[in-house]
Amino acid sequence: RKEVEQDPGPFNVPEGATVAFNCTYSNSASQSFFWYRQDCRKEPKLLMSVYSSGNEDGRFTAQLNRASQYISLLIRDSKLSDSATYLCVVNNNYDMRFGAGTRLTVKP
Amino acid sequence: GAVVSQHPSWVICKSGTSVKIECRSLDFQATTMFWYRQFPKQSLMLMATSNEGSKATYEQGVEKDKFLINHASLTLSTLTVTSAHPEDSSFYICSAVSSGGTDTQYFGPGTRLTVL
């Protein structure tokens, strides 16, 4: 079993749609969680951290369920510029493990 | 925000040559830097953890004699791919953690290596 698993997609959605990505992790000792965005041939960039209480940043909402070892990312009102690969990242004392990423394409 | 640079951004070399990639934290000190490799359509895979002034810790399956890592200062780590072969062609990305900060890793822009 992979340490971090994501649905690779691709997710093809129209502008304005709401889309949700899920991620599961296997290491119950993991301490912190992140969503990164990676554009084609570029480095990953931090989108948001994920907290147990859930957190929201504009159109993006992230949630963590430690009991189920599950992380989610919700994107509302999708924009064309949201097209990218979204990486779920699980961290245990600087040991970061990346999911394979979920590819999102937002179409006009 | 914190800035990490990598040089070169891309390199093409012949099989058998060695390639050095530099990773620098420009506006903060990084006691720990990480080297990742990413093959097309795959996620980042951690190769090694580099701590300033000590030997790097390599992930299982990564040859330490092939991928030489030097973390000589708090702002510079280098990865040398020795005797590169076509299968080493990949996107190499470094990241750094600020000495006095959270566990957020700041990524360099990556180096695309193509070995002919």
Image (cartoon, coloured by chain):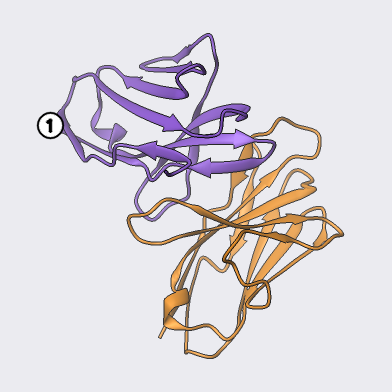
Chain colours: A purple, B orange
Q: Looking at the picture, tell me which residue is in the foreground, A90 or B20.
A: A90
Task: Indicate whether B115 appears above or below B75.
Answer: below
Question: Which quarter of the picture shows residue B52?
Answer: bottom right
The amino acid on which the numbered mark 1 sits, given as a three-letter code, is Pro
Residue B41 position within the rendered picture, expressed as x and y whole percent measured from the top left: 32, 55
Q: Residues within 10 Å of mark 1 (few under 14, many from 20)?
A: few
Mark 1 secondary-structure assignment:
loop
Please indicate whether residue B7 sits to the left or right of residue A18 in the image: right
In the rendered image, the residue lying farthest to the right is B53
Residue at x 67%, y 40% (from the top left corner):
A94
In the rendered image, the residue lying farthest to the top is A53
Residue at x 29%, y 34% (from the top left corner):
A81
Residue A74 position within the rendered picture, expressed as x and y whole percent measured from the top left: 33, 20
Residue at x 48%, y 83% (from the top left corner):
B85
Q: Looking at the picture, tell me which residue is in the foreground, B60 or B22.
A: B60
Q: Looking at the picture, tell me which residue is in the foreground, B87 or B32.
A: B87
Task: Indicate whether B111 appears above or below A83.
Answer: below
Residue at x 53%, y 43% (from the top left corner):
A97
Chain letter for the residue marked with disc 1 in the picture: A
Question: Which quarter of the picture shows residue A83?
Answer: top left
Q: Looking at the picture, tell me which residue is in the foreground, B21 or A25.
A: A25
Please indicate whether residue B29 sits to the left or right of residue A101 in the image: right
Q: Which residue is mark 1?
A: A108
Please indicate whether residue A13 sits to the left or right of residue A90 in the image: left
